[in-house]
Image: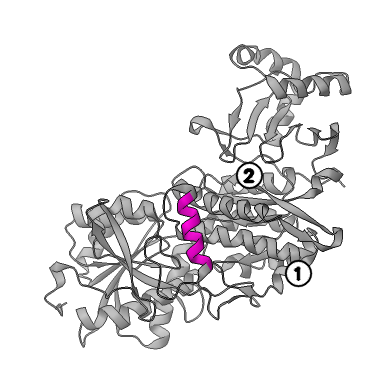
Amino acid sequence: MIAIVPDIIRAPLTLAGGSKRVLTTALLAALLILAPTTRAASAVAAEECRIELGFATLRDLISQAEGMDVVGNCLENVHYTALGDGLQRAVGGLLVWRKASNWTGFSDGHQTWISGPFGLEKRLNSDRLPWETTRIKVGLLAPLSGNNSDAGQEMLRGAQLAVQQINAAGGAYVRDQDEYMILDLVAGDTQSTPEGGVAAATALVLQDRADIVTGGYASVVTLASQVVVAQNGVPFIIGVATTPQVTRRTDIDTSWMFHYAETAPLQGKTVAAFLDEVVRPLVAGERKLRVALIYQDSAFGNDVLLGLPDLGIIGWTESQGLPIEFVAQEKFKLGETDFRLQLAAVKAANPDVIVPIAFFHEAVDIITQGIRDLGIEALWGPAPAVDTQSYFSALGQLGSFTTVESRFSSFDPPQGEGAVAARFRVEYERLWGEPPSQFAATLYDSMVIAREAVTTAGTPDKSRVRDALARLDMPALTLPVVGGRIRFDEHHEVQLATFVAQLFFDPASSEARPRIVWPKDIATTEFRLPPVLESGVQQP
């Protein structure tokens, strides 16, 4: 079977030294059509790089088999991905060494030559050799470079821990073949951009032939990358990205999509309920609480405000008749770093509370600029989707008394946390030397869910794995699930239980540290007003 290959077939990859490489079919076509000119032009590159060791052996084997030099001269020296895979571009295509399976291969964009357990073999990129099916390939879409790389690395580490544990236990049992298959984790770097997400997804499903895809950070990136996954009929367990559009849009076949994250409208509901129940009585008394919103103008930001009927910060407030008044709604574009114009408008509205709806590095800049540059005295938060060590470290003392909405706390386990989550915390910190974030926990769970789906299906067949995910019913793992069991509903969503944590400065680490303050049944401390507001009810 020959697949129709889109424009980009190789994901952007984070290589040694932080450099990035993108190989497209357009580039391959140019290299092949202009072979004499390109090969001459690459003479300089050839003097600066070398094809060595296993790659040199593979090039010789392919030349002998094909009667010509298919690989050609190198265009760069070998580099290594976050998973330790070696990659080297050549005039004819891409040389790859997979660390997990220890095979060496070369692809020209249409077909692949592999030096594996049975010597040199050739196949179409859309096919697999019989021995390749002994592994279940799980793709991970994550921002391993770019503005959100900290979160991407946390996602990768959580996935790696789960795969390590699953494979140590024998892998996933495949009933139809009566054997255990180990999981082969393949990471695609989205570079924190929609274009990078499309490139990474294309590589995972067409070149790496992933059986299941996981990950998906940032709604705008995931909305772009999931199109490729759906078109090629691959199950996608989407974690981190929160827009409900990923399973509710109508322009693609979303039957392949399974959303394992709290949706943005439910994040907004959590924020509104906390402000009404906890903050308003302390700050506003009998009057309405004055709230200012500064939000990312994207699917994520807009959906937190009002993504589904009667949900979101605004939707829940209006549907429940909460005594909350939105005195400012200031938006910013993805990628902005100077928020002082929006903050000036917010300050002029004299709010009690400012809620930043942004990626964690944006939220840090918003709070820092608001306090240091504009001298705003107000409560900050709860900020959704920012609960990471990078956020706590970057805010430092400025983070004191701010709040965050979350589903998993790095430093403060909720009361009644389950045994799986407790073990995960211990094993993650032992392996990586730091507490796990909500992003690491989400991808850990996603890998376990993928293993369970394959086992239930009895095969890695994509359609049957999709059907197994649709009827999945298993105990909650590291993330708290409403009802205690992981089940995808009619929208292919799992409803996660969320909470609010307040940050307090920790002199020992010089970082802010979260403590869960709401809801009361899992709280580890009580919410406190900052000293500047401790006098009680404020006048508007």
The local secondary structure at tag 2 comes to helix
| Rendering coords of residue 230 (x, y %) | 71, 59
Q: Position of residue 290 (x, y in %)?
A: 25, 76
Of labels 2 and 1, earlier in sequence is 2
**Residue 389 vertical placement versus 257 (above, below):** above
Give the quadrant of residue 403: bottom left
Considering depth in this image, is 46 or 502 the residue closer to the camera?
A: 502
- Indicate the quadrant where residue 389 lies: bottom left
Q: CA distance from mark 2 to mark 1?
A: 27 Å
* 489 in the magenta segment: no
Q: Which residues are magenta?
A: 420-430
Name the foreground residue: 409 vs 297.
409
The reply to whether residue 329 is in sight is no
Give amino acid for label 1: Asp
Q: Main secondary structure of the magenta part?
A: helix
Q: Which numbered dot is residue 453?
A: none
Q: Give the class, few, some or many, for how many residues have Cα within 10 Å of label 2's Cα (few <14, many ≥20).
A: many
Q: Say whether residue 529 is left or right of residue 457.
A: left
Q: Which residue is mark 2?
A: 199
Q: Nearer the viewer, residue 338 or 398?
A: 398
Q: Is residue 18 above or below residue 417?
A: above
Which residue does the numbered mark 1 point to in the structure image? 467
Task: Tell me, yes or no, whether the highlighted magenta stretch contains residue 429.
Answer: yes
Location of residue 234 by image quarter: bottom right
Residue type (three-letter) at the residue carrying disc 2: Ala
Q: Nearer the viewer, mark 2 or mark 1?
A: 1
- The x, y position of residue 527, in whole percent, is 26, 74
Image location of residue 371, percent across then percent down: 20, 57
Q: Is residue 342 left or right of residue 23?
A: left
- Where's the C terminus, which quadrant? bottom left
Mark 1 burial class by Cα count in 10 Å: few <14, some 14-19, many 20+: some
